[in-house]
Amino acid sequence: MADDRALLEALRAGSTEALAELFELYSDRMYRLAAGILHDEDEAEGVVQDVFLRLIEHSDRFEGRSSLGTWLYRTTHNACIDRLRRRKPVQPLADEAYTTDEDAGFMPTIFADWAHAPEEVFGSDEAGEVIEEAVQSLPLGLREVFILREVEGLSTAETAEALGISEGAAKVRLHRARLELREALSVYFAEQVSGRSE
Amino acid sequence: MKCEELVAYLSDYIDGNLDEELTAAAQEHLATCHNCHVVLDTTRKAIYLSRQRVATAMPAERRERLFSRLQESIRKRDDCEF
């Protein structure tokens, strides 16, 4: 597999093979982030298209200060935020909205042990929808950090760079996202577990 | 370590980012606090389930359509003399 810089050179020269390889490497990741932010598959596809067109037209502007992957995530994120702003005015999520002080107030309230329930409890269509809804219901600032860290496997530093936030904010938001997800899923799975034991 | 502290350190504990002293204190608390142990296990499970559910590829039809449009844009660019 060619490295990113060689692929960009080839793309600049009009190579559709380079486009195919870059598309294979990055399109799903960009799409997941965009769909996670926008909650709309058509718009997510539009964002991936726009970002790839930018890459095709202006690949010389990629300076290589960050990895191509991080640059693509950042550009995808920014394109999504632009679309959200066009939909309705959104308040930027300030780093200080998720400080450690704020976070100290969040405590779990459900203590049912559903983690060791039989696998079929987690494999139903209904459970799948509940899980998806729980992720989608996270506030935007938590959701995008969760997707980049947990789904895409970026480091804290890469996530912070892609989203234009501090590493401390990325850490706090991931922590908060995990706790909120656990709480949301506990409502459903605790009921499933208690229903089986009755 | 108290429950509030355990919850505050939970993500760092899951990621293995706590130093030796805090890891030992967390483990000591977890050995005796049922609720915190449940919070740890269910948080790990919530992360796993969410990761599995969200990590899906773009639908094939959408992917093919999008790639064709991008290929077309490269061809058009190459056709342009300016």
Image: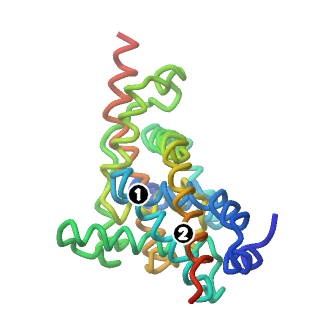
Name the colouring of the figure. rainbow
Q: Is residue B40 left or right of residue B71?
A: left
Q: Mark 2 points at which residue?
A: B73
- Farthest residue toward the top? A198
Q: In this view, does A22 lie to the left or right of A111?
A: right
Disc 1 with disc 2 on a shared chain: no
Quadrant housing residue A14: bottom right
Q: Name the residue under label 1.
A: A44
The circle drawn on residue A77 is: none
> Circle 2 marks a residue in which chain?
B
Q: What residue type is labelled 1?
A: Ala
Can you see residue B33? no
Vertical relation: B61 (above or below) A76: above
Quadrant of the rendering where the C terminus of chain A is positioned? top left
Q: Position of residue B45 (x, y in %)?
A: 51, 39
Q: In this view, does A116 lie to the left or right of B4?
A: right
Q: Which amino acid does label 2 sit on?
A: Ser
Contact (Cβ within 8 Å) of mark 1 with mark 2:
no
